[in-house]
Structure formats: structure tokens, C-alpha cells
Amino acid sequence: MSTPTSPEIRRVQPARRLTGVIRLPGDKSISHRYAMLGAIAEGTSEIQGFASSADCQSTLNCLEALGVPIERDKDWVLIRGQGLRGLRQPSADLDAGNSGSTMRMLAGILAGQRFESCLVGDASLSRRPMRRVIDPLTRMGARIEFSEGGLPPLRIAGADLHPIHHRPSVASAQVKTAVLFAGLLAEGETKVDEPVPTRNHTEIALERMGVAITRANGTISIQGPARLQPLQAQVPGDLSSAAFFVAAALLTPESELVIQNAGLNPTRAAALTILTRMGADIQQEEVRALNGEPVGDLRVRHSQLDGGEIPVELVPNLIDELPVLAVLGTQTDRGLWFHGAQELRVKESDRLRTVAENLRRLGAKVEEFPDGLRVEGRQKLRGAKVESYGDHRIAMAFAVAGLISEGGVEIQGSECVGVSFPEFFDILGQVTEPS
Ligand code: S3P
């Protein structure tokens, strides 16, 4: 169904239906956190189901460069924690690759070390805003040099940190995590306000590792310095990766797909909520907890969707799913629109622009706002060449578009799916019947 015509170009042909039972690789967000926290825990952490994503490998590489012994065999990872202050000064720059999570969250740990280190990234990451972590970590006592405009590389001279009460200007789980990680090393109580709750994997992991962390009236507090017990944990399947298959099954007639072991943390599951409200037939089965994280199986059947507005308060909890939701919106009765998503402009690509441009190439009507998009409903998508813009979620969103297009979609630069989901095209091929 999708054959590579060169290492970087994939054709995705129209599909008759999607069926089968799939299991997705481990959650990227959770894997980053388990790895970083395991590195500063006192003892050895063993993680099953670790994400296969290149981004999480970037995190492991940085931790190894900081003197953390790590063993890895497929999705099994063993991390010999060095304690809060046991990391070693790296002999070279720490390369976060394409991963904003690696750079921003690791900065929180590096801010409290007694050595200097430098975080660098690829061309896309080097254009992404870092002031959001530079400012609070500087207030805590770290000295951070950066490029003009608050861009990477970040040269961090660690220091003895003092606690702050941080009121972030953007709703960001990465920023919250960076400040809480620094708070582990600071003497006293560090607080982060969160008017809109963002993904809470950090808080859940810290609790499991024996750290006292509280949330009251939208403020999260942590007492430092903290000692972390090692983790024995299994990572749930990545719900943001599952979203592409959920969308594909909803859009393709006669489809019925079961996605096993998907993370269902409510701070990540807003896409399921909104789709269900729009009429999607998505059943959650066998719901249980894995190390404090809700997981379950998703049974998704083809559905005609009403569409409508994505409420602004849900946007932070489905920020990574918006590209594929925009594609899906073209098939709804009323179309789909959203505001309050200006963060999409500073992701791996400017996702408002790249989604709009690719949709137009497929002949779709789409309106771009400074902070959102509106796509018309009941649109036919014609076959066309689209660009990934080096952005994994754009490549996968437009693979879904290919399944429902009239002539198939050719995705240029499709190899970037490896950033979060290297198995994407293989699994898609396994569950898709061509039309
Ligand atoms: C992430 C948080 C989100 C998300 C990113 C991963 C995390 O970013 O887009 O893919 O793991 O905390 P922000 O918190 O910056 O919005």
C-alpha cells in the first residue's frame, strides 16, 4: 500500500479500509522523563516499552555523554542512576537532535550541576524558542548563554539553585518539567503555576520515585533537594502516535481497528474527547494503570463526524494531534476550526502554515489564522505531492490524507517519521487494504 520510491519519498495510496489489532511503540513524552529521572535517581532503573523514537535516543545519548551508564536492547532500557549531583561534565556538546523535549527538560537538570555544558540541536531545533526555559532557570541561579532571539545552542553554567514561584507565559509541559527538574536540585519549595493543566507525566513519575509533589489550585509544588528512588516501569503506547491510526480508521469506510496498550492519561486524551463529541465511535477497553499512568485498548470504527470548533481550553491537551485533526476536518459535515494554537507556529515546523499549504496542494479549502485554522467540511482530496517540511507529525498527518485521497499522496521527506514513530509506515501497511 505504501512503497518507498526513494529513501525519502513515500506514496500512500487510497485505502478501502483499515482492520486489525496493533500495538504501538512506547510514549515519547514518558520515555524522555523516565530516562532523565532515572539518570539522577539513586540506583538502577529498568524501563520496558521505551520509545523507539529518534528523539528519545537523543535523550539517552545526552545522558550517556553525562556519564550515565545505559544498556539498551530494543525497547528495554537499563539506566544506572548517578544521583542528583553525580552527572559528569561532558567532553563535547550535548546533541538534542530534533528534540525540543530533550533540550528544554534536560536544561532543568543541567542548571543545577556544578559544571558547564552546551546543548545543541539540528536546524529545526535551532530555530525554536528557548527563553521560556532560560528565564526561569536563570532566576533560579543558573547562568545560560544563548543565541540571539533566545535560540539554541544553550551554554549552561550550573549553580547552586534557589527555588522560585514560576508563572509561565505559555502553557507548556516542557517548561513546567524543566522548572520542576531544577526544583529537585534547589534548596526549598519550587512552585509552578499552571492555569491550564498540561500533560502531567512528570508529576506522576516523580511521585512514583518517592518525591513529595503537590498540586493545589493550579499550582504545583516540589520540595528540594529530593532523593529519587529508581523506577521499574513499563511505558504505555504513545497516544499521539495512535492518533494517526484513530483518524485513519474513523475516515475510511468499513474500518475497525484495535489499538492495544495506548496511554490514556486525561491530560493527553483531549483528541479522543473531541472526536467522541463529534460522533466518533471510539471505545476504551481494558482500562488499567501502568505505574500511575492510565492505559487501555482503543477500538475505533469508521464514523461520520459532525465537526465544529475545538474549544480553546482543550488545545494544550491535543497540541500534537492538531495536524491530523485538521486533515480529518476536511471529511466532517461542518468542517473544523480552532484558535489559541499559536504554539503550533514554533513546533518542528510552523504547523499552521505547513498543514494549510499541504491541504491546499490536495485541493482543500483552508483558512489560516495567526493562532489557528479553519478547514471546510465534506471536501474531496485530490492526489498530489506534499512536503513533510522535516516534521514527523506533518508527514504522518498527510499519510492519513493519502488514504482518503482520490489519487494517492506522495510525501517528500517522509523519513522524518523516525523522530517519533519509525514503525509508522510498516504498521500502516499491515492494517490497510488498498482500494
Ligand atoms: C511535550 C509537550 C508538548 C508537546 C511535545 C512534547 C512533553 O510541548 O508538543 O511534543 O513531552 O512535555 P509543549 O509542552 O512545549 O507545548
Image (cartoon, helix red, strand yellow):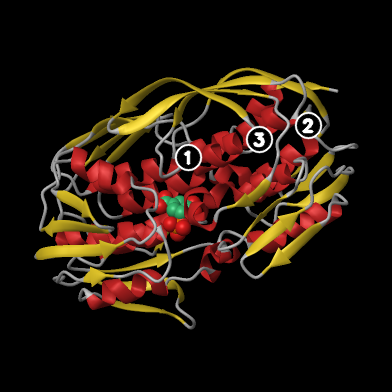
Quadrant for the C terminus, please: top right
Query: Which one is nearer the viewer's eye here, 365 or 307?
Result: 307
Say whether disc 3 or disc 1 marks the residue closer to the N-terminus: 3
Residue that label 2 marks: 3
The label number, if any, that marks residue 247 in the structure image: 3
Q: Amino acid at mark 1?
A: Ala
Label 2 Cα crowd, 10 Å radius (few <14 / some 14-19 / many 20+): few
Q: x, y (%) of residue 174?
A: 38, 58
Q: x, y (%) of residue 151?
A: 47, 75
Q: Identify the element where label 2 is drawn.
A: strand
Q: x, y (%) of residue 250?
A: 68, 30
Q: Identify the element where label 3 is drawn.
A: helix
- Residue appearing at x 16%, y 70% in the figure: 161
- Residue appearing at x 57%, y 61% in the figure: 341
Label 1 Cα crowd, 10 Å radius (few <14 / some 14-19 / many 20+): some
| Visible residue check, residue 193 | yes
Alpha-carbon span between mark 1 and mark 2: 31 Å
Alpha-carbon span between mark 3 and mark 1: 14 Å
Label 3 Cα crowd, 10 Å radius (few <14 / some 14-19 / many 20+): many
- Residue appearing at x 47%, y 40% in the figure: 269
The label number, if any, that marks residue 269 in the structure image: 1
- Residue appearing at x 89%, y 43% in the figure: 382
Q: Identify the element where label 1 is drawn.
A: loop
Quadrant for the N terminus, please: top right
Specify whether 320 is left or right of 60.
Answer: right
* Ligand 1's quadrant: bottom left
